[in-house]
Amino acid sequence: MTDELFEQSIRRIQQGDKAGLKQIYEAYAAFIYSVIYDILKNRESAEDVTSDFFIKLWNVAEQYRFGGKHKAYLATIAHNMAIDYIRKNRHEQTTEEIQDVVDAGAAATTIGMQQETVENSVIQDITMKEAILTLKEPE
C-alpha cells in the first residue's frame, strides 16, 4: 500500500467509513501480526493483540500526521501494544507468583511451628502478607 492510499484509508476512517479500516487490515494484517509475534512469541497472544491493534487504529486515526511514513507508524503502535501486553501480563504473573510464595511460606511456617499456638502462626502469615504488599512491582 502506498503512502497516498494509506492516507486515503485513514481519511475514510476519520469519516467513520469502515472500508478504510478494511483496506488497511487487508494490506497490513500479516505485517502487524509478525511485529507483535516477534515480541510476544506466542501465537494466541499475538492474534489477540493484532485484533486489538485494528480497534486501536480506528480509535486513534484522528491523531495520524499526514505525510509521515505510515508503515513505521503502524509498526510503532504494534510494538508498543505488544510491550504493554507483556507488562500487563507480567504484573498478573508476578502477583500470582507472590501469592504462591506467600501460600508456600504460610504452609512451611505452619508445618515448622507445630509446637507454637495457632495465633502465632496466623500473626506470622498476616505479617508476611502485609510485608509483601508493601513492596513495589519491581521489588
Image (cartoon, rainbow, N blue to C red):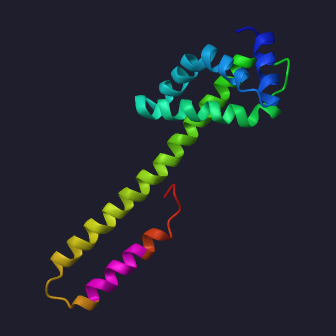
The x and y percentages for residue 9 are 76, 19
The x and y percentages for residue 81 are 60, 36
Residue range of the region highlighted in magenta in the rendering: 120-129
Residue placed at 73% from the left, 21% from the top? 20
Residue 42 visible somewhere in the drawing:
no
Q: Is residue 16 above or below residue 115?
A: above
Q: Is residue 35 above or below residue 84?
A: above
Q: Quadrant of residue 21?
A: top right
Q: Is residue 125 magenta?
A: yes
In the image shown, does 34 or 27 lie closer to the viewer?
27
Is 125 placed left or right of 76 in the picture? left
Q: Is residue 101 above or below residue 92?
A: below
Residue placed at 16% from the left, 76% from the top? 111
Q: Is residue 94 magenta?
A: no
Q: Is residue 107 above or below residue 127?
A: above
Main SS type for the magenta part? helix
The x and y percentages for residue 56 are 67, 36
